[in-house]
Image (cartoon, rainbow, N blue to C red):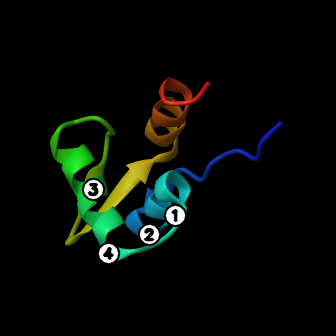
Amino acid sequence: MTDALPMMIDSRQAVKMIFGSTDRKHYYRLYEMIEREEIGAKKLGDRWFIPGTAMQKFIDENTG
């Protein structure tokens, strides 16, 4: 059993969870995924946050 995800995940945490590192190129990939609505996100000010439920849905859809 895995730990529950936080209610909101910032872009740094999301990049680390999805790609395994925080290289700048992965941020661009994440933002492209958000624009294509492959993963749900909310913009608060100038920062993007992904709801924990949206991240869990993305993980479930893209794993085994």
Depth check: give the residue in front, 25 or 57.
Answer: 25
Q: Residue furthest right?
A: 1
Q: What's the residue type where badge 1 is placed?
A: Lys
Q: What's the residue type where badge 4 is placed?
A: Arg
Secondary structure under tag 2 reads: helix
- The residue where tag 3 is placed is 29
Q: Determine whether 63 is above or below 41 in the image.
A: above
Q: Label 1 near label 2: C-beta < 8 Å? A: yes
CA gap, disc 3 to disc 1? 12 Å
The tag earlier along the polypeptide, 1 or 4, is 1
Quarter of the image where one finds residue 31: bottom left
Quarter of the image where one finds residue 17: bottom right
Q: Determine whether 32 is above or below 28 in the image.
A: above
CA gap, disc 2 to disc 4? 10 Å
Secondary structure under tag 3 reads: helix
The tag earlier along the polypeptide, 2 or 3, is 2
CA gap, disc 2 to disc 3? 12 Å
- The residue where tag 4 is placed is 24
How many marks can you see? 4
- The residue where tag 1 is placed is 16
| Place of residue 63 in the rendered image (x, y in percent of width and height, measured from the top left) | 57, 30
Secondary structure under tag 4 reads: helix
Q: What's the residue type where badge 2 is placed?
A: Arg
Residue located 20% across and 72% down the image: 46
- The residue where tag 2 is placed is 12
